[in-house]
Image (cartoon, grey):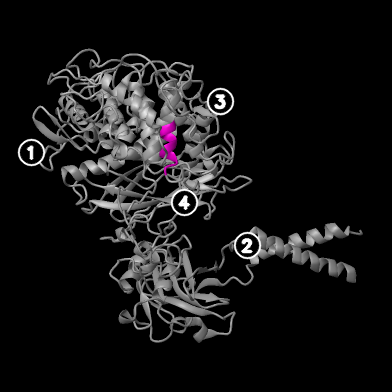
Amino acid sequence: MMHTIRRSWLRRTGVAGLTAAVSLAGATSASAADRVNVMPDRQVRPGVSLPVFGSADGGVGLANGQGYEWIFTPNADVNIADDGNLNGVIANDRFIVENVTFTLLNGSTREIVTATLRVNGDAGTQKSVQIDIVATNDPISNTQLENLAVNVNIAIANGLRAMYLSQVTTAGPAFGSWNHVLVNNQPYNCGTTAFTIWAFANSGHRPTNSVNNDIYAEWVQRSVDWVLAQAFIRVPPVAGAAFAANLTVTPDGNGNNRALSLCGNDGLHDMGYASPTAAAALVAAYSANPNLVRTSAPFNGESYRTIVQDAVDWISASQEDIGFSQRGGWRYTFDDGADTSADSWNYVALEGFEAVFGGTVLEDVKREAERRIDDSQAEAPSPSATGQFGYTGSNPIFGVGSGGNATTAGGLSGLVMISRGGRTGFHLDPGGSLTSAVFPSVASRKAAAVNMLGTYYHVAGNTWTGNIPNFYAMWTSARALRLNGTSQLTNQGTTFNWESGEATSAPGVVAPPGDPQEGYFAYLTRTQNANGQWLFTVNSPYWSQPLNTAWGVLILQPRVFPPPCEDSDNDGVCDFFPNGDPQDNCRFVANPNQADSDGDGIGDACDDSQALVCDVDNDNDVDNTDILLIRQKNGQMAPPGDPFDPNGDGRINIADQRFCALRRTPADQ
Amino acid sequence: MKMNKAVCIVALALLVGAGSVTRAEAIPVVSLSGIPAIWIIGDSFKVDVVVTGLDEATGGVNIDLTFDDTTLTGTGYGFGAIAFNTPVDLVNGLDLSTGFAGTTVNLNWTSFELQAVLTAAQGPFPSGPVTLATVNFDATASGANGFGFQTVDLSNNDGTALLPVCIAGQPCPVPEPGTLALFGAALAAFGVRRLRRS
């Protein structure tokens, strides 16, 4: 998790009040907003314009026309430059935005400012977001690796915002989806939507999160609804019959005599890519609660486990049954041959189903996949190719030495899938029919694939070959390497961390831009647009800006699937219950005992109320200095929780002085 | 002419209700006293900040008083002994005034006393005139008038809210619509009784 937020940041070195607080907007409407959301807490660099945004009443137009205001906590060490829209009338209740640039003052290197969005002047309809302003010379950011970590947090936050803003929100059949842009059709749009759901879920914004606490949650839910509305229902083929010729068990894991092509009719070209991605996205989105039952159409009354099982049934049935080199793989449509690119999307869906949902992939499917892996991995005893995966055959795409990183990584994810849980390869491990002197085991195949990903790491990407800046190759590599537990590669004699670009020979040093071993994180954080998007990086009709943005966020997250239990502070207590209700009473500060001595639902470890009220200078007593500091803010408005407004009436004035005069600690009386 | 009963009731309610807006019943009034009609160079005088009609205690004040600095020089200030107990010093309160600056003198006092200062000094409520603060002036030229308030904030005793106050000679805050409606309704009911009696 990006950072720990506690009230201790309120310690200030000066007292001169700087405020952007304003009076309430005059506009009103007949009915006040019931719900306000704000963007998630985040980090930002000083001097960089940040859109601070929120929504009202779910952002579907109901709150348009009402008045709003943004209130920023005064902080003597921060100059808050706004764009003049601190208050007004809501024109777009999905994105009530104020562009702000923070500048740190008085030598401060890190401050946190609270921004509060109020709608319709109703103090009860408001929410606050904490913005962590971090300079590059702050102790949490003053090494190259720390600096990169902060940049990653910022890039993810910006990417999520860009995805949120690019969702189709106009009424109609596309409502809730993301458009691929370059190929505007059902499978491409469904695939784009699925990857975006996945990116949100991997960043902690699950569709099951409370809509009161997560501005993105209900929009991710809408996108899930959209994907499921595309689903095409089939009857699973009987084992041994056409389309299941090599299966000894009918692919119907839950016995409901149904299989699902999630993104639409599997007869449509390219659905063989999109549908398994949708299955993987559902695994990511519901990793904490696969048994959650839907309460609305489509699939009302069915659990996500049932839906994903049916999708896996379809994946199992659509595996290619025949052919010399393509048996056991997947391609554009149902039983349509194989290419390693399509294989990869199916491998990962199956991996997620087993590893995260606890499901079972048919042994027959894994055995068949072994055939495909053997046929697609280059075995030629050549140091420039051995271990690479080809596209439809074993030759690395477009010739040996070109560096088919996407296909090689795709094949690696297949090797991980078939060996998950310590499974021994039926064909590929010793004793199997497909071992060789070059590849005597699954482990040797994995090592060879990893070696090739390192060897060709520096090759510039284009549509199908190379690496950076081909986001498809990067995302496929990132997920395969993570699934395989590989953090380092070797390229041109240098062993380095492929995320950061830190070489083992130069600890703490991040490879510079354009370096052959530049890490994915460094590349992504320096190439993201200010609006959070990553643009079209290679001249290809397939890898569009919306896909790149979702993949960018996915690459920047350290995992392929979110864990069943999100535990931001690693204290062994999940952040949320499976239904989305808060569980950890102090999410960002480890408190395994969950102590809550005052019973207010906020753990002692981060309960501001445990702090001394009126001790605004944080010196553990309440004395005349505290009253003086409050007095110096007389006349200012205060957002909820502002310690300078101890009586909590939203204004700092003589009443707060009196309030604290009655609470001076005995030693100071 | 015989007046329709309903019209009479509404008119009565509106008339009296409207009057309540400017009469500011039950809202304490802050005023100045001791201002000479005119002053000439060499005069010295003091001006008291006085509140009347307090119906609960105050635990602190923050006042910005304005004056004509082309004819007057502020020479000192103090807080009312009755209002804030005697002696007024750091033992029982905190003076955080910023004092004289141009045409303004800021008077900021917070009591340390647990019990409301005016409860002990003045009760029962509503109180008569209570001096909150006194400001001393020397005249540097002939002059008259020119005093006013920029800020008049009085805390209640426990520091949870400001007390509503009016400034003498200025319109009082308009009561909340809900309060006004209730007030009007009560008056309307009163009017009905009067009409029935007649």
Q: Residue at x 52, y 75 (%)?
A: B51
User: What separation in Å lies between label 3 and label 4 (alpha carbons)?
Assistant: 32 Å
Q: What amino acid type should be assigned to the residue bearing mark 4?
A: Lys
User: What separation in Å lies between label 3 and label 1 (alpha carbons)?
Assistant: 54 Å
The residue identified by callout 2 is B175
From this viewpoint, is residue B107 visible? Answer: yes
Q: Earlier in the sequence, mark 3 or mark 4?
A: 4
The residue identified by callout 1 is A505
The residue identified by callout 3 is A173
At mark 1, the secondary structure is loop
Tag of residue A127: 4
Q: Is residue A195 left or right of residue B51?
A: left
Q: Is residue A505 magenta?
A: no
Residue B134: give x, y in percent of width and height.
42, 77
Residue B154: give x, y in percent of width and height.
48, 71
Q: Nearer the viewer, mark 3 or mark 4?
A: 3
Q: Nearer the viewer, mark 4 or mark 2?
A: 4
Label 3 close to label 2 by CB (< 8 Å)? no
Quadrant housing residue A515: top left
Q: What amino acid type should be assigned to the residue bearing mark 1?
A: Ser
User: What separation in Å lies between label 4 and label 1 (alpha carbons)?
Assistant: 48 Å
